Amino acid sequence: MPAKSKAQQKAAGAALAAKRGETSKGELHEASKQMYESMSERELEEMASTKRKGKPEHKG
């Protein structure tokens, strides 16, 4: 599923980094923690790789 906003894409990227062991889970904020726990690495990768052009900063 593609990200619906830039903020959602950034949260997915942070959760993906934690899943891969590049950052610690403790550094994640609430949205990223929820994504980390509920989504697979493949789902996070798909969401984080969404093109940013035309996306709002936050979902309204």
Image (cartoon, rainbow, N blue to C red):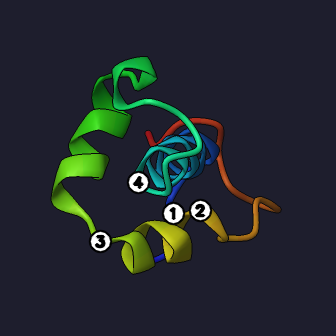
Query: Residue 19 got which mark?
Result: 4
Label 3: how many Cα within 10 Å (few below 14, some 14–19, many 20+): few
| Marks 3/1: CA–CA distance | 15 Å
Height in image: 26 above or below 46? Answer: above
**What amino acid is found at the position of numbered circle 4 in the picture?**
Lys
Please, what secondary structure does the residue beneath circle 1 have?
Answer: loop
Residue 59: image location, x then y, percent:
46, 43
Task: State yes or no: discs 2 and 4 in contact (Cβ < 8 Å).
Answer: no
**What amino acid is found at the position of numbered circle 2 in the picture?**
Ala
Seen at 66% across and 70% down, the residue is 49
**What amino acid is found at the position of numbered circle 1 in the picture?**
Ala
Query: Residue 3 got which mark?
Result: 1
Task: State yes or no: discs 3 and 1 in contact (Cβ < 8 Å).
Answer: no
| Marks 3/4: CA–CA distance | 9 Å
Discs 3/1, front: 3
| Marks 2/4: CA–CA distance | 13 Å
Seen at 40% across and 70% down, the residue is 41
Which quadrant of the figure has residue 24?
A: top left
Residue placed under numbered mark 3 in the picture: 40
Residue 6: image location, x then y, percent:
64, 46
Height in image: 45 above or below 30? Answer: below
Task: State yes or no: discs 2 and 1 in contact (Cβ < 8 Å).
Answer: yes
In primary-sequence order, the first of circles 3 and 1 is 1
- Residue furthest left as drawn: 38
Pick the quarter of the image with the C terminus. top left
In primary-sequence order, the first of circles 2 and 4 is 4
Please, what secondary structure does the residue beneath circle 3 have?
Answer: loop
Closer-to-camera residue (4/37): 37
| Marks 2/1: CA–CA distance | 7 Å
| Marks 4/1: CA–CA distance | 18 Å
Pick the quarter of the image with the N terminus. bottom left
